[in-house]
Image (cartoon, helix red, strand yellow):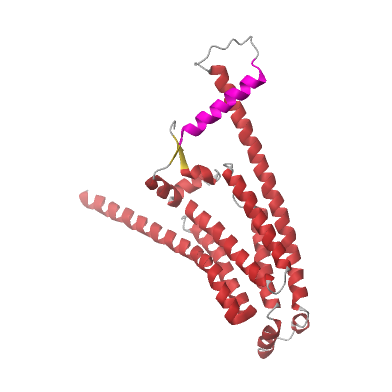
Amino acid sequence: MEKNKIINITKEEKKKKNHIRNKVLVNLITFIRSLGSIAIIPIYLTGGSLAAGLATIGFFATDFIDGLLARKLHVQSFFGSLLDGLSDKAFGIVCLLLLSTVNPIFLGVVAVELGILAVNYKSIERGNNAKSSIAGKVKTAFLAASIVGSFFCHAAPTLKEVLNYINITSLNTILEKDPTILSTILAIPTIGASLYVAADYRKKAEKQDIEREQELNSSTIDTLSVSEDEDIDESVRISLDEIAKRREELMHQKEEVKELKSKDELIHDLFDTDFYLEHKDDGIKRLFYKNKRQ
């Protein structure tokens, strides 16, 4: 009996160690993309557009690999999700800024990307969930293809030599075109997709604002109707000013019952997979607070 208990404990410990190892592995793959936002600069400056294009394929591939492994190994977490989103944005913007040195149209893509970031930041600040939508994922694919393709376009002479060396001449006509025109053709659909996503995220944030407002108003009415602190005659109409005042008091009370989680609680919730799966649709801001009444 005691032997079986020891064996079970050993299996649990091994399972826990494997889970931690897998989680570290997936987050390291994501972190490679974060490092890529720094590494791509010397790669571009020393190796040119062709080296940068090849490198971006590898860095963008980590975005697919880490998500696939996280789901397969069941190691999703808020930390991984936040790191993934920040890595995507940082790497994409740095690549776009590099491309803007040879084609200014990419400054327009940067501006739209920063606009999306601002919309999501404001939404998160209000307590909303700014999780990536399907449109956002499609836009990211457009952006990756545009960046890689544009690097290759501006490496056309070198790329042509390499392809011709291995007897591939079918792309010569395209590679002989003006690289700025080619990269512009790639950038325009990306700008369109980014503008659509910015509008989509803004619409999503406004919808969540309305839903939260309705929930708060419902809570206010319920609290007013069952309040034990004041004697309300149901036959007396409550003026709009009184309702607004009471609502403000309730909002203030709601803020008072919030407190930041402890360091240990925050670390647990950032890295725990079960917590992530249960609360992934909540606003990120709520991750840092707990409610005293709960």
Which image quadrant for residue 238? top right
Please tell me which residue is depicted at 52% across the width and 54% down the height of the picture.
82
Specify whether residue 249 is painted magenta.
yes
Q: Would residue 230 be found to the left or right of residue 3 on screen?
A: right
Single out the residue that lies furthest toward the left.
Answer: 2
| Point 44% across, 47% down: residue | 269
User: Could you say where residue 216 lies in the image, as x and y percent from the top left?
Assistant: 59, 30
The image quadrant that residue 234 belongs to is top right
Main secondary-structure element of the magenta-colored stretch: helix
| Residue 77 visible within the image | no
Q: Position of residue 272 (x, y in %)?
A: 43, 50
Coordinates of residue 158 in the picture (x, y in percent)? 67, 85
Who's the residue at 52% across and 44% down the image? 285
Is 127 contained in the magenta span?
no
* Chain part drawn in magenta: 238-258
Q: Nearer the viewer, residue 102 or 92?
A: 102
**Looking at the image, is 208 positioned above or below residue 111?**
above
